[in-house]
Image (cartoon, rainbow, N blue to C red):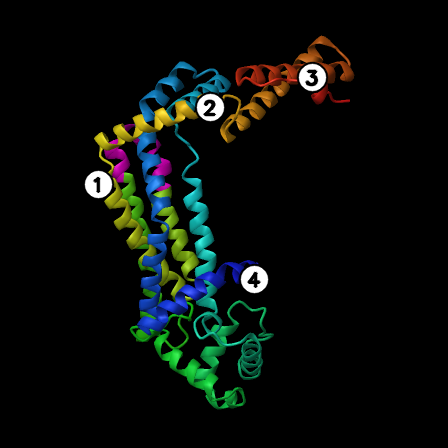
């Protein structure tokens, strides 16, 4: 896991170092860093929002299909896939932004856990020596470079025992000491982990640190509540899943709060601003994607999908392949065991019947999408 943090953290470290060199304040650098990453990810946000708006146009048709094929799940899947293909809509389009956000979070965590590496650009050998000194002067047992928080703990130890680090040179001491003073928000150290049971009592720093996780959760809830209100306003049928939506709206922020209490305050501070800017972007895009504009976009995308299908008649989408596999499995497993026992056939005969059914399902799917099918390639012993 540490290797993953290292790989993803390098480019984010360069970006944070550049930003910090201009503003010379870590909290401000996190805010600017969040703005920059949101700008870089705006094309993804735009595409996701557009896809969600287009899916809303399909909801009446999808509901009609559900009623028509309520007793035939396999046929329902096929008809839904046909509709997605005709409209040029990818129902899994929202997965990419979630993956990118998770990818981004790994980089942010590494940058905040390792400010001496990424911001101060001090060599690994010097950091290793500093961590060894901190291990001798702290109560942390077994403190070494494998500890993800080794740099934060070393910075905190240096604040109280700066004389112990004289052997590392004045350059190291001055850099880390100066950075320690700017690694704060309103005097609270962003490298410390928030807690509801501060050892020194409820000092000003402890209050600020404890507030960060709650603010992060509230900011995330703001985005969720707004998205839910907008969805219900534009798509009243979505209210049917209100229970699940309520769990997501309030459950995810609570989970974020719990996570933020186990991570350095800088992570929670980043989450606050990430949610704030996400809300602003979502609000702006919702205003941009009016029903008239979405209808016009939908017609263009449908035409693109039609042209693509004509040029690539035999090329299957990911969803089509998934449906083929599901159809084959359904055909293979659909009542074969029960019918085999009822007829009193042998196990080998039953297996042969299952293989024949699987071949037939594959042949039908191949014919449906214009492909050739060779039984010899799919025979099983």
Span colored in magenta: 229-247
Q: Nearer the viewer, mark 2 or mark 1?
A: 2
When the figure is inspected, residue 139 is found, relative to residue 162, above or below; the finding is: above
* Side of 219 relative to 79 (left or right): left
In the rendered structure, find residue 375 and report the number of the disc placed on it.
3
Q: What's the distance in space between the residues labelled 2 and 4, CA to CA?
A: 46 Å
Near-viewer residue (72 or 299):
299
Residue 341 in the figure: left or right of residue 221: right
What residue lies at 37% left-to-right and 56% top-to-bottom?
Answer: 37
Q: Secondary structure at mark 1?
A: helix
Question: Sequence order check: which comes first, mark 2 or mark 1?
Answer: 1
User: Can you give x and y, in whole percent of width and height, for residue 209 in the image?
Assistant: 35, 68
Which residue matches tag 4? Answer: 2
User: Which of the marked residues, 3 or 1, is nearer the chain's N terminus?
Assistant: 1
For the residues labelled 3 and 2, say whether their Cβ atoms are less than 8 Å apart.
no
Q: Which residue is mark 2?
A: 311
Q: Main secondary structure of the magenta part?
A: helix
* Residue 241, image x, y percentages: 35, 32
Q: Tell me which numbered mark, 2 or 4, is placed earlier along the sequence.
A: 4
Residue 283 position in % (x across, y down): 24, 45
What residue is shown with label 1?
A: 287
Alpha-carbon distance for marks 1 and 4?
42 Å
Query: Residue drawn 68% across and 14% down?
Result: 356
């Amino acid at each position: 896991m540490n290797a993953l943090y290292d790989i993803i953290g390098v480019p984010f470290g360069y970006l944070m170092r550049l930003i910090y060199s201009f503003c010379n304040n870590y909290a401000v650098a996190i805010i600017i860093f969040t703005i920059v990453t949101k700008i870089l990810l705006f094309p993804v946000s735009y595409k996701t929002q557009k896809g969600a708006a287009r899916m809303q146009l399909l909801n009446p048709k999808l509901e009609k299909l559900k009623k028509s094929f309520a007793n035939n799940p396999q046929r329902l899947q096929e008809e839904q896939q046909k509709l997605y293909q005709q409209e040029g809509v990818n129902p899994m389009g929202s997965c990419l932004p979630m993956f990118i956000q998770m990818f981004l979070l790994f980089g942010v965590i590494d940058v905040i856990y390792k400010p001496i590496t990424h911001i101060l650009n001090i060599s690994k050998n010097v950091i290793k020596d500093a961590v060894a000194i901190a291990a001798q002067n702290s109560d942390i047992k077994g403190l070494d470079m494998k500890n993800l928080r080794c740099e934060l703990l070393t910075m905190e130890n240096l604040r109280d025992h700066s004389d112990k680090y004289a052997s590392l040179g004045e350059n190291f001491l001055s850099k880390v000491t100066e950075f320690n003073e700017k690694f704060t928000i309103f005097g609270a150290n962003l490298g410390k982990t928030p807690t509801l049971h501060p050892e020194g009592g409820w000092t000003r720093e402890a209050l600020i640190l404890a507030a960060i996780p709650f603010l992060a959760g509230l900011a995330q809830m703001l985005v969720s509540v707004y998205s839910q209100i907008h969805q219900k306003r534009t798509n009243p049928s979505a209210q049917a899943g209100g229970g699940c939506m309520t769990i997501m709206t309030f459950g995810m922020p609570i989970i974020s709060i719990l996570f933020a209490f186990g991570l350095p305050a800088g992570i929670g501070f980043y989450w606050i601003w990430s949610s704030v800017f996400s809300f602003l972007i979502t609000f702006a895009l919702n205003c941009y994607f009016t029903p008239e504009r979405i209808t016009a976009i939908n017609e263009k995308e449908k035409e693109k999908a039609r042209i693509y299908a004509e040029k690539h008649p035999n090329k299957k989408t990911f969803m089509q392949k998934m449906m083929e596999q599901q159809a084959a499995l359904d055909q293979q497993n659909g009542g074969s065991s029960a019918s085999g026992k009822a007829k009193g056939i042998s196990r080998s005969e039953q297996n042969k019947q299952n293989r024949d059914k699987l071949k037939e399902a594959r042949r039908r799917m191949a014919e449906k999408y214009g492909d050739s099918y060779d039984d010899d390639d799919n025979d099983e012993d």
